[in-house]
Amino acid sequence: MTDFIHRFEPATSAGSPPLLLLHGTGGDENDLLGLGKMISPGSALLSPRGRVLEHGMPRFFRRLAEGVFDEDDVRRRALELGDFVSDARKQYGIAAPVAVGFSNGANIAAALLLLRPDVLAGAALLRAMVPLSDPPKAELGGKPVLLLSGQADPIVPASNSARLAALLSQAAASVTHKVLPVGHQLSQADVTLARGWIGNVAAEAA
């Protein structure tokens, strides 16, 4: 298997989609397990640790400055992550997962949607930015995507998250974009909205 330190927790409910949990800068494979259980009780949880270190803090790809990504690295790391998910699906016997990413994890999930659309069944992108300035022409075929942005987010400008929503819509994803009255950190509203959205995704899949 592609070499990611990770945690896997098997499903306890047959009707819940597997989740790929992708942490933010400085997080690890344990960070979003609680969130995954809150928004989709019973789902299998696959949670890798980012392989890039920035001042000792794990991330999923390199950046040159706040909000400025090393796009060659974004592409390479997204493809590596896609290989990891494909290997993990075989090893653990799970369906294509729904990504749940926060901040840096949301950005790599967005890149994965654009570069390897076959890998994910959908994605909940919490505080995501446009990952690539010149993205490939992707065909997402109605895959569900939830984009939750913070109105007072000092890291992600509103224009950037709106651009990401438009980009994914143009690639034929079924995008739900909500702007919450919060900053960059997650809130109870994120949990509530993500739980409702995942429930709808599971119901439609059934």
Image (spheres, helix red, strand yellow):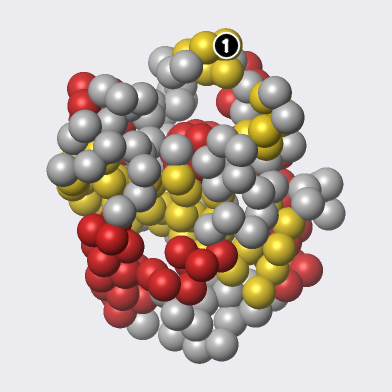
Residue 166 visible in the snapshot: no
Quarter that holds the C terminus: bottom left
How many dots with numbers? 1
Residue 168 visible in the snapshot: yes
Q: Is residue 10 above or below residue 90?
A: below
Residue at 51% across / 67% down in the picture?
A: 34
Q: Is residue 122 left or right of residue 150?
A: right
Residue at 41% across / 56% down in the picture?
A: 122
Q: Is residue 90 left or right of residue 114?
A: right
Residue at 63% across / 22% down in the picture?
A: 62
In-front residue for pair 182/86: 182
Q: Position of residue 116 (x, y in %)?
A: 55, 41
In-front residue for pair 101/202: 101
Quarter that holds the N terminus: bottom right
Residue at 52% across / 12% down in the picture?
A: 65
Q: Position of residue 97 (x, y in %)?
A: 53, 62
Q: Is residue 11 above or below residue 172?
A: below
Q: Position of residue 60 (x, y in %)?
A: 62, 35
Residue that carries the numbered disc 1 in the rendered image: 64
> For mark 1, does the 10 Å Cα neighbourhood hold few (<14), some (14 to 19), or many (20 or more) residues?
few
Residue lying furthest bottom in this view?
A: 13
Helix, strand or loop for disc 1: strand
Amino acid tagged 1: Leu
Q: Is residue 177 above or below residue 86?
A: above
Q: Is residue 16 left or right of residue 166?
A: right
Q: Position of residue 58 (x, y in %)?
A: 67, 36
Q: Is residue 199 left or right of residue 132?
A: left
